[in-house]
Amino acid sequence: MASEPKHLYVTYNQIHTLIGNASKRIAEEFPPNIIVAIGGGGFFPARVLRTFLKDTSNGKNIPIQAIGLSLYEDLPNTTAEQLGNQVIRTQWLGPEVKNLLGKRVLIVDEVDDSRTTLQYAVSELQKDVELQLLAFPEEERDALRTKFAIFVVHNKLKPKRGTLPPGLPYFSGDDLPDVWCDYPWESKDIYEHDRLAAAGRPLTPQ
Ligand code: 5GP
């Protein structure tokens, strides 16, 4: 029987600090016009990141669009055929896809584990953009093609099932071994959560 993965309890403050640190690199290398948050884990990081990026976006709030993705294996009542590591959309962009044209779009999630979700998000958003570009003359399309990048709070250093386009800018708040992260927004008793975090290994470079 597979043994329980090691748990790592992460606090709101640690996550906030990691996002603040990463925001400096993001602001220099890929200041986004739009954030696409992958729900539910990407929502809180996206909102905090927007706070840190506000100074570099002329004091304007960067719009956050939401998409919802789940691995089949995480959903209840899935059939054996659906099991595996497929991703399904629980929420997707509507006509807002048009707003991505010509922009730098940062895709945000809390954790890059097998990378299946991120591969799906990037490839599907790129497909949507290509469809939108068909409405424009060919010579205008390159300039309008959306540039994508990724930010995750935690990247697990492990063999990845998913792949990302070569050269795609990728930012992580922290790189971790293959442990299971317990995030504060998943916890009902935040004080107990913080106690468990304090007893674990310190994560955030101070
Ligand atoms: P993927 O394997 O596609 O990279 O990750 C899929 C999703 O599984 C993540 O977006 C996240 O919701 C969930 N996940 C993966 N690893 C962890 C983890 O260590 N902790 C938590 N809470 N969720 C995780």
Image: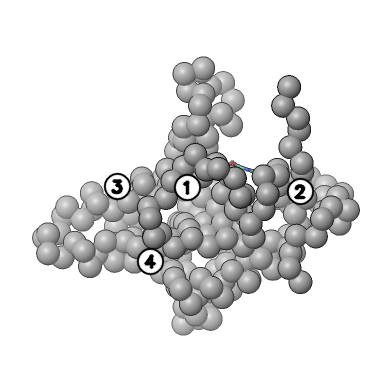
Real-space Cα separation, disc 4 to disc 1, in angstroms = 17 Å
- Give the residue at x 44% y 71%: 30
Which residue in the structure is indicated by mark 2? 8
User: Where does label 1 land, which residue?
Assistant: 118
- Disc 2 under 8 Å from ligand 1? The reply is yes
Secondary structure at numbered mark 1: helix
Rendered-image quadrant of the N terminus: top right
In this rendering, the label closer to the viewer, 3 or 1? 1
- State the CA–CA distance, disc 2 to disc 4: 33 Å
User: Residue 77: percent from the left, percent from the top?
Assistant: 56, 21
Seen at 50% across and 31% down, the residue is: 85
Instruction: Check disc 2 and report its element: helix, strand or loop.
Output: strand
Q: Which numbered disc covers residue 104?
A: 4
For label 3, the residue is: 127
Looking at this view, is 42 or 172 the one in front?
A: 172
Nearest to viewer (mark 3 / mark 2): 2
Element assignment for label 3:
helix
Asked if ligand 1 lies within 8 A of label 1, the reply is yes
User: Is residue 76 shown above or below 14?
Assistant: above
Would residue 90 be visible to someone looking at this image? no
